[in-house]
Image (cartoon, coloured by chain):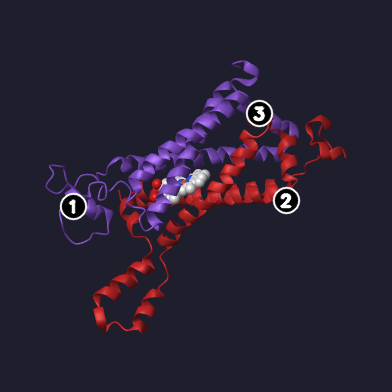
């Protein structure tokens, strides 16, 4: 299980500068130390950091999503076109939903990426799976974003009783 | 890092230089205690919590895929969306939603634990304690959620629909 090793020391830059600083003891000048610290963090370590930062934001977004849609009012069964379109008419709700979309898809896809890389040893199979994963993530972001920002809450052809109240005021 | 028993059982660890890598710590932990070496990483409960974090993460991602598609139907027409969302009204779905929210709640709480283990200077030391806190918070949150959610669905208006 390779990930358990990854979990210990992810931030490439910090590790390298520490090792250099302690190995070369007193002969290390401040300039060298500064140089090593300026190394760019590895791609893996950026992904590792991203999982934690996006996870922290997701707590608030997911909690808000579940509270407003599943817990408040009449619960899940209240969800229908009028309810959702009515919500997305507010820019605040639209932005919160957009952030939720972007962060869940990127966090989830990045997580599945590490799962694929951990278990799929065959490199061409792994490359195909990763390509499919990225294509799926891009398609979900595109589809979700388009739906969220182009929805007409009062489509003229629809029966009135299916629409949010503000369509008639 | 998760589940490596260096802190839980600190006094019984063989002495030596500090080891930063979990695999090295695990290897040292197994030394001289009759545990099989080499075959598999052997952590404590934390190892299974890590497996559960992984499975819950992938499962939530699969649901996310379905959920973005079913929500996208809202762009087709109000009637089409209401019909799709009506499929979630089957009684079995209420239980499915309960399991899904349990997976998300566990994953989120354990995510906080992972973040604290990695960024808080004493996080690794308290990882086992944080696991007990996680279980407690999980039970409280899920009780509240189950009460409200099942009240809105299965037990709506007193009847088991
Ligand atoms: C609600 C707040 C969430 C928090 C705090 C959170 C936290 C985390 C953290 C810290 C990791 C990194 C684990 C590691 O590097 O070992 C992770 C992994 C993962 N998360 Fe989340 N997450 C959340 C929500 C989600 C959601 C909504 C999804 C699905 C779309 C998801 C899917 C995953 C996956 C697939 C992994 C990879 C598991 C692995 O590599 O073992 N997470 N999560």
The residue that mark 1 highlights is B28
Question: Which residue lies at the image location 83% right of the left edge and 32% below the top edge?
Answer: A160
Q: Is residue B151 above or below residue B135?
A: above
Question: Which residue lies at the image location 59% right of the left edge and 29% below the top edge?
Answer: B148
Q: Does label 3 point to a residue whose CB lies under 8 Å from ligand 1?
A: no
Chain A shade: red
Say which mark, if any, is on residue A41: none
- Secondary element at image label 3: helix
Q: Is residue B106 left or right of residue B34?
A: right
The residue that mark 2 highlights is A91
Q: Is label 1 on the same chain as label 2? A: no
Residue B82: x and y in percent read 70, 30
- Secondary element at image label 2: helix
Question: Which residue lies at the image location 58% right of the left edge and 51% below the top edge?
Answer: A102
Residue B64: x and y in percent read 55, 41
The residue that mark 3 highlights is A77
How would you rate the neighbour count of disc 1 (Cα within 10 Å): few for under 14, some for 14-19, many for 20 or more?
some
- Secondary element at image label 1: helix
């Amino acid at each position: 299980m390779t990930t358990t090793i990854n979990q210990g020391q992810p931030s490439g830059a910090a590790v390298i500068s520490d090792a250099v600083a302690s190995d070369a003891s007193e002969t290390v000048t401040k300039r060298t130390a500064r140089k090593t610290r300026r190394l760019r963090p590895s791609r893996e370590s950026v992904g590792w950091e991203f999982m934690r930062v996006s996870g922290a934001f997701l707590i608030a977004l997911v909690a808000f999503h579940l509270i407003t849609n599943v817990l408040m009012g009449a619960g899940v069964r209240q969800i229908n076109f009028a309810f959702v379109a009515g919500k997305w008419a507010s820019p605040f709700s639209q932005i919160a939903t957009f952030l939720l979309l972007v962060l869940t898809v990127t966090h989830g896809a990045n997580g599945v990426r590490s799962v694929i890389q951990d278990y799929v040893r065959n490199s061409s199979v792994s490359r195909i799976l990763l390509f499919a994963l990225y294509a799926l993530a891009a398609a979900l972001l595109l589809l979700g974003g388009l739906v969220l920002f182009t929805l007409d809450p009062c489509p003229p052809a629809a029966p009135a009783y299916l629409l949010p109240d503000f369509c008639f005021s | 890092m998760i589940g490596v028993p260096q802190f839980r059982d600190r006094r019984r660890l063989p002495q030596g230089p500090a080891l930063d890598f979990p695999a090295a710590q695990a290897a040292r932990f197994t030394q001289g205690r009759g545990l099989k070496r080499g075959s598999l990483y052997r952590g404590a409960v934390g190892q299974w919590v890590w497996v559960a974090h992984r499975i819950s993460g992938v499962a939530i991602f699969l649901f996310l895929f379905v959920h973005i598609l079913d929500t996208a139907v809202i762009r087709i027409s109000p009637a089409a969306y209401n019909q799709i969302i009506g499929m979630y009204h089957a009684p079995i779905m209420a239980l499915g939603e309960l399991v899904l929210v349990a997976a998300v709640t566990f994953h989120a709480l354990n995510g906080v634990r992972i973040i604290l283990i990695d960024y808080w200077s004493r996080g690794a030391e308290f990882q086992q304690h944080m696991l007990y806190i996680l279980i407690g918070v999980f039970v409280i949150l899920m009780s509240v959620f189950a009460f409200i959610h099942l009240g809105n669905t299965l037990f709506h208006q007193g009847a088991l629909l």
